[in-house]
Amino acid sequence: MPPPTPSLWDYFSDLPDPRRSQGRRHKLRDILAVALCAVLCGADDFTEIEAFGETREAWLRQFLDLPHGIPSHDTFGRVFAALDPRAFGRCFMSWVRGVASLSEGAIVAIDGKAVRRSYDAARDCPAIKLVSAWARENRLTLGQVKVAAGSNEITAVPELLRALAVKGCVVTADALNCQKEIAAEVRRRGADYVLALKGNHGGLHERVAQFLSSVRGGRTHGFQLGEHTSVEKEHGRIEERYFLQVEAPADLTAGGEWVGLASVGMCEAVRELDGEVSRHRRYYLSSLPVEAGKFAEAVRGHWAVENSCHWVLDVAFGEDDSRVRVAHAAENFALLRRIVNNLLQHERSVKLGVKAKRLKAALDENYLLKVLRL
């Protein structure tokens, strides 16, 4: 039987092997393939990967060499700890570009996530934090970069953007990443941005809030504006969202500090649950021209990175509880989860959640092959 996904394996074929050539018993390709299949079928650590491999060895031998059988959990651990995460990430991003194309105006949400149990007290290593790019329409993680120790997302986001092909897309980010350099990098990549604005830019936040309030109240005129309203009713909750997008005033665009800034916007959410009403406003900077429906779609699209990616990684893969932590192992295993999540999100022949799909893949070899043939 030929390899189930020659395209997938091929994208990782140039990944440098961190081990010395002398004494290698297992091929790197075999190690990666067994680990990928195991995680797809529900394994969440190296011991479980070994157990999967031993149970499915006959099946795996149909497309892997396995000259010395299934590697031990220690071997899996050592290899993933030593594997260059940047090289692994480049292979991953090359694979994603090869299997998915982003449509014009596609929403790409940039957000960070800590892998909480990767904290290693014995080695005094803090929990790693990863910044990922999530394509909402494609339901795919496009790339991942680790935040350097002692730094924050602000330095990692431009690095991630430089590695992505986002021309023509709309990049969204939370208030932490509402930064001039990030806005400039998005524009250099040929994309537009919608950046949440909060109190970390106190003066700017107040200026935008007052300006939009004045426009909404009819006290300021002469600016192009657009409005959009949406209503959701679910499980006894009613939520109405009002979006206002206005052409950016000259005092915000003068000097070009925010590259490409074309509009400012607001989302006001009014939620009613069990007779109680709450109201919340968020403000945004954007390079998009005034088109309130598109602006509203971008704002709401950003929330998908939490609901469709981070929540899934924690609930379906137990990422927050993972104790994989030695050297580069936590970062590399996190990328392995995202490869598997991409595969499962893209496989839509069954109407199941990701966790249920993992179980189905473990029980049904034909379905496992179908998932792997992305």
Image: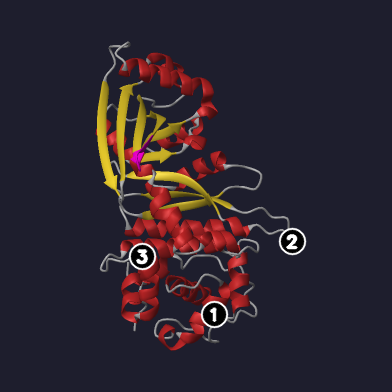
**Is 179 left or right of 299, judged from the image as shown?**
right
2 or 1: tag closer to the N-terminus: 1
Q: Is residue 291 visible?
A: no
Identify the residue position indicated by label 2 in the image: 122
125 with respect to 50 (left or right): right
Which tag, 3 or 1, sits closer to the chain's start?
A: 1
Viewer-nearest of discs 2 and 1: 2
Image: magenta residue range: 272-277
What residue is rendered at 26% in x and 19% in y? 224
Q: Residue 47: x percent and y percent?
A: 57, 77
Measured in 3D between alpha carbons, the distance from the residue under mark 3 to the one under mark 2, in whole angstroms, is 35 Å
Which residue is at a point 42% across and 34% down the rendered structure image?
A: 195
Between disc 3 and disc 2, whose residue precedes?
2
In which quadrant of the rendered image does the C terminus lie? bottom left
Q: Name the quadrant of the N terminus.
A: bottom left
State yes or no: discs 3 and 2 in contact (Cβ < 8 Å).
no
* The magenta stretch spans residue 209: no
Q: Name the kind of residue labelled 3 in the image.
A: Leu
The answer for how far apart the CA atoms under marks 3 and 1 are is 22 Å
What distance separates the C-alpha of mark 2 from that of mark 1?
Answer: 25 Å
* Vertical comparison of 349 with 56: above or below: above
At horizontal 50% and vertical 42% (from top left) the residue drawn is 157
Mark carried by residue 294 = none
Q: Amino acid at mark 1?
A: Glu
The crowd level at tag 2 (other Cα within 10 Å; few <14, some 14-19, many 20+) is few
Residue 274 sits inside the magenta stretch: yes
Can residue 213 be seen from the camera position used here? yes
Residue in view at x 62 percent, y 65 percent: 81
| Residue hosting label 1 | 50
